[in-house]
Image (cartoon, rainbow, N blue to C red):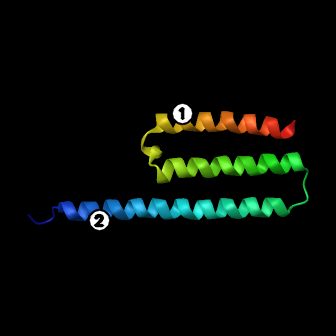
Amino acid sequence: MIGMPSASSFLNSSRRRHSNLLTHAWIALLALSLASTLLTMLPVYSALLGGGILILALIKARVILARYLDLAESPTWLRGFTFVMIAFACLILALYLI
């Protein structure tokens, strides 16, 4: 039939879209790593530095969960993992500040 996409063209476009999302996630992770590095070079109070690096690490973890593990397709699981990560990060920050 003319005008009907074949199954292989659908898979190719789906694969391209998926790899494009992964490329964007990879670029975001590189930018966040660069931001972490630049943050360590700033003359700031150590508690502020630790909190900033922890926040950037949380953002990186969420990008990895959402894009590389495809949890963006399951928002309930993504919210659950995000809640656990934030709770764990708050505990780590509290222990760091003590």
Q: Residues within 10 Å of mark 1 (few under 14, many from 20)?
A: few
Q: Which residue is mark 2?
A: 12
Q: CA distance from mark 1 to mark 2?
A: 32 Å
The local secondary structure at tag 2 comes to helix
Locate the C terminus by quadrant: top right
Q: Describe residue 75's horizontal placement relative to residue 45 as left or right.
A: left
Numbered label attached to residue 80: 1
Discs 1/2, front: 1
Quarter where residue 87 is shown:
top right
- The mark nearer the N terminus, 1 or 2, is 2
The local secondary structure at tag 1 comes to helix
Q: Residues within 10 Å of mark 2 (few under 14, many from 20)?
A: few
Residue at the image position 68 percent from the left and 50 percent from the top:
57
The total number of labels drawn is 2
Numbered label attached to residue 95: none
User: Is the residue 1 above or below the residue 90 in the image?
Assistant: below
What is the x, y in percent for residue 73? 42, 44
What is the x, y in percent for residue 59? 64, 49
Residue at the image position 29 percent from the left and 65 percent from the top:
12
Locate the N terminus by quadrant: bottom left
Quarter where residue 79 is shown:
top right
Circles 1 and 2 in contact, beta carbons < 8 Å: no
Residue at the image position 81 percent from the left and 48 percent from the top:
50
Q: Furthest residue to the left? A: 1
Q: Amino acid at mark 1?
A: Gly
Q: Describe residue 3's horizontal placement relative to residue 90 as left or right.
A: left
What is the x, y in percent for residue 9? 24, 65
Q: Amino acid at mark 2?
A: Asn
Residue at the image position 48 percent from the left and 36 percent from the top:
77
